Image (cartoon, rainbow, N blue to C red):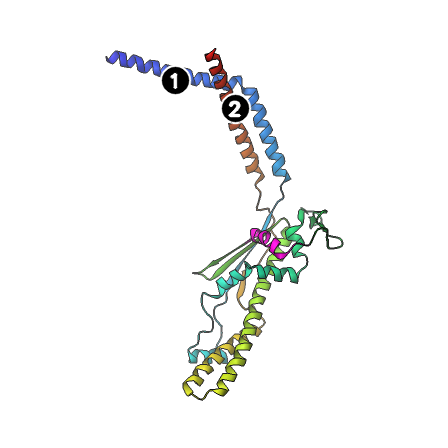
Amino acid sequence: MTNQYQTNADNSFEDDRIDVAELFGFLWEGKKTIIIVTTVCFLYSIFYALSLNHYYKSAATLSVIEAVSGGGTMGGLASIAGISIQQVGVKGPRFINTLRSRAFLKHLISVDENVLPALMAAESYDIESKKIIFDPNVYDAANKKWLIPKPNYLEAYPYYMSYLYSYYHDMRRIIDVQFEHISPIFAKEFLDAIIREGDRVLREFDMQVSIDSLAYLNVELSETKLLNIKSSINQMILSQMQTKMMTQLGYNYVVKIIDPPFVPLYPSRPSRRFIAMVGFLGGLVVSILFVLMRQYINFNITKQK
């Protein structure tokens, strides 16, 4: 019984070796097909990779301004009144949400007329002249004229968001901002504009709110006779005066630049080597499967005859 089992096992092992040998035999017979298909896929992946534009990513690191340095009069009075000068943990997410808003993109487009063409009509980048080459069927760069109906900022918003990356680190109150574009110079300059205009938009908004609030509170203070209400109004006036003072100072209001935007030297994507490698391996796998499938079909047809 044992000898018979051993004999069957040896036969099975021998059959497996024969199957493997036949498998390599099939692949050797179809080596021309494998070489041709793999080469075609590899060359196509190379041409495809070369046809893609390089994208460059500029980045910056920002620190959220959460407190007022120094012991000025306003700061001292606010501390005595028990008023928190800045709402800790609010300004960072507020800045991020502003950068990601459609209204902010509309503002950027209104500030710089080159933003919309760079987002919607850029075709390639000339390294020698360091200029963006625009699609001649879409935008006339020489005359700064659209050859199609001018895109709306809502149409440009998906492009803007696909190039923009921003993240707020709550524990450290640090903001990472990145912008990607086929032009490394535009990526840097536009990121500068994003940071500058984001801070300015929030500054002007808070300034107007504080002006309107002070006007309202002063009227209420003059009409109120109750001492406890007058005390509360005075505290609110002090807080709004502090906000107004901060919005009128020359330095940054919401964020302070730790690591400024830069002109990237090397592209961030695409990885042409990776694309070529995927094309080579994909062609190799497809050609092997094709050869084996062809041999399997031929074997079944021969068997049926």
Start and end of the magenta stretch? Answer: 150-164
Q: Position of residue 104 (x, y in %)?
A: 58, 61
What percent of the width, then of the height, locates residue 202? 55, 67
First reached walking from the N terminus: tag 1 or tag 2: 1
- Along the viewing direction, whichever of 114 and 146 lies nearer the viewer: 146
Q: Can residue 139 be seen in this view?
A: yes
Which amino acid, by three-letter code, is at mark 1?
Asp
Residue 184 is left or right of residue 214, and the answer is: right
Decide whether residue 156 is among the magenta residues. yes
Residue that appears at 34% across and 13% down = 11
Q: How many marks?
A: 2
Residue 285 has which mark? none
Q: Is residue 126 above or below residue 259?
A: above
Crowding at dot 2, Cα within 10 Å, few <14 / some 14-19 / many 20+, comes out as: some
> Quick check: marks 1 and 2 in contact, CB under 8 Å?
no
Rendered position, 129 above or below 10: below
Q: Tag 2's secondary structure? A: helix
Residue 51 higher or lower than 287, as above or below: below
Place of residue 86 in the rendered image (x, y in percent of width and height, measured from the top left): 47, 71
Q: Which type of secondary structure does the marked residue at label 1 adopt?
A: helix
Magenta: predominant secondary structure element?
helix
| Residue at figure coordinates x 61%, y 50% from the top left | 181
Residue that label 1 marks: 16
Callout 1 crowding tier (Cα within 10 Å): few <14, some 14–19, many ≥20: few
Cα distance between the residues tagged 1 and 2: 22 Å
User: Which residue in the rendered view is the most extreme toward the left?
Assistant: 1
Q: Is residue 12 magenta?
A: no
Q: Residue, x 56% and y 70% (percent of image)? A: 205
Which quadrant would residue 274 be assigned to in this image? top right
Q: Work out whether residue 10 or residue 223 is closer to the camera in this orientation and state it.
A: 223
Q: Name the residue under label 2.
A: 290
